[in-house]
Image (tube, helix red, strand yellow):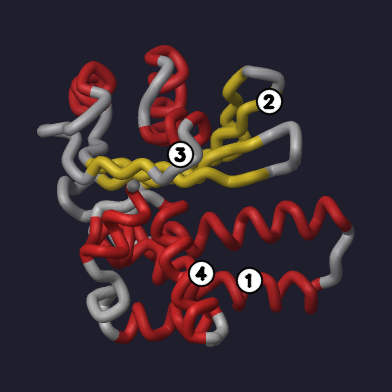
Amino acid sequence: VVTGCDHASLLVRRDGRYVTVGASDGIAKRIDDLERLAGDGPCVDAIEEETPQIETDLTAPSQWHRLAARLVAETPVRGAMGFRILVDRRKSGALNLFSDKAGAFDTQAAGQAIVLASFASVAINAVAQGEDVATLRRGLMSNREIGKAVGMLMMLHGVDEHDAFDVLRRYSQDLNIKLADVARTVIEHRGNPIFSGDDRSSDKG
C-alpha cells in the first residue's frame, strides 16, 4: 500500500501510556518498544507534536540520534515515518511505517501514508459512531486526494501537515472550488503551481 514500507505498527496513547495495538511483525513491535524506552521517535513524536514525522535515512539522522543508532544496530530498518491518528477524544495514536532501505520513503510514499492514516482515522471513528458502510466509503474517498496533496506539499515545500492543509483550504475558499478539486490540481502538477514562496512564508509567520 505504501511504497518502500517493510514493517508497520499502530501505537496508541492510552491514559498517558503508549501501547502497541497492532504490528506487522516482531521488528515493528521492537521499534515501538525502543521508542517507548527512549521517550521519542517518529511514532511518539507524531502523537505528541500532532504532525507527521519522517526520517528517510536512519544511518544519517536529522533527529532522534540515539534512537536511530539503536535501530540501525538492532534492526534492519533504515527509514521511518509516523502519522497521527485520532482515535477518540481521550485517545490518539500513530500509524508507523518502516523501511529496510534508506531513502525509500519519498514524496509518493508520504502521500500514500497520509491517505492510509486518514482512512484509518475515518474507519475507527465511523465504527465507533455506528456509521454504515456507504457513509464510511464517502468519507474515505473525499479524504484520498486531499491526503495525497497534503503529502506532496509537505515533502516538496518543507511545511507541516497543518500548513499544507491550510494552503489547500485557502485556495478552495478564494477560488470557490471544492477542496478535492484543488487537491487534484496539486497532484496533477506535482505541487508546484499552487504553492508559492509567499504562501509558505505566510503560513509559517
Which residue is under mark 1? 140
Disc 1/disc 4 C-alpha distance (Å): 18 Å
Disc 4/disc 3 C-alpha distance (Å): 38 Å
CB-based contact (under 8 Å), mark 1 and mark 2? no
Which residue is under mark 2? 14
Note whether 8 is above or below 107 in the view shown.
above
Q: Residue at x 58, y 46 (%)?
A: 85
Residue 121: x percent and y percent?
64, 54
Residue at the extreme left of the image, as rendered: 60
Q: Nearer the viewer, mark 2 or mark 4?
A: 4
Mark 1 burial class by Cα count in 10 Å: few <14, some 14-19, many 20+: some
Residue 90: x percent and y percent?
74, 32
N-terminal of the pair, mark 2 or mark 3, is 2
Question: Quick check: can you spot residue 17?
Answer: yes
Considering depth in this image, is 60 or 145 the residue closer to the camera? 145
CB-based contact (under 8 Å), mark 3 and mark 1? no
Q: Nearer the viewer, mark 2 or mark 3?
A: 2
Considering depth in this image, is 43 or 9 the residue closer to the camera? 43
Which labelled disc corresponds to residue 169?
A: 4
What kind of residue is marked 4?
Answer: Arg
CB-based contact (under 8 Å), mark 4 and mark 3? no
Secondary structure under badge 4? helix
Q: Nearer the viewer, mark 4 or mark 3?
A: 4
N-terminal of the pair, mark 1 or mark 2, is 2
What kind of residue is marked 1?
Answer: Leu
Q: Quadrant location of residue 199?
A: bottom left
Which labelled disc corresponds to residue 177?
A: none
Which residue is under mark 3? 25
Secondary structure under badge 2? strand
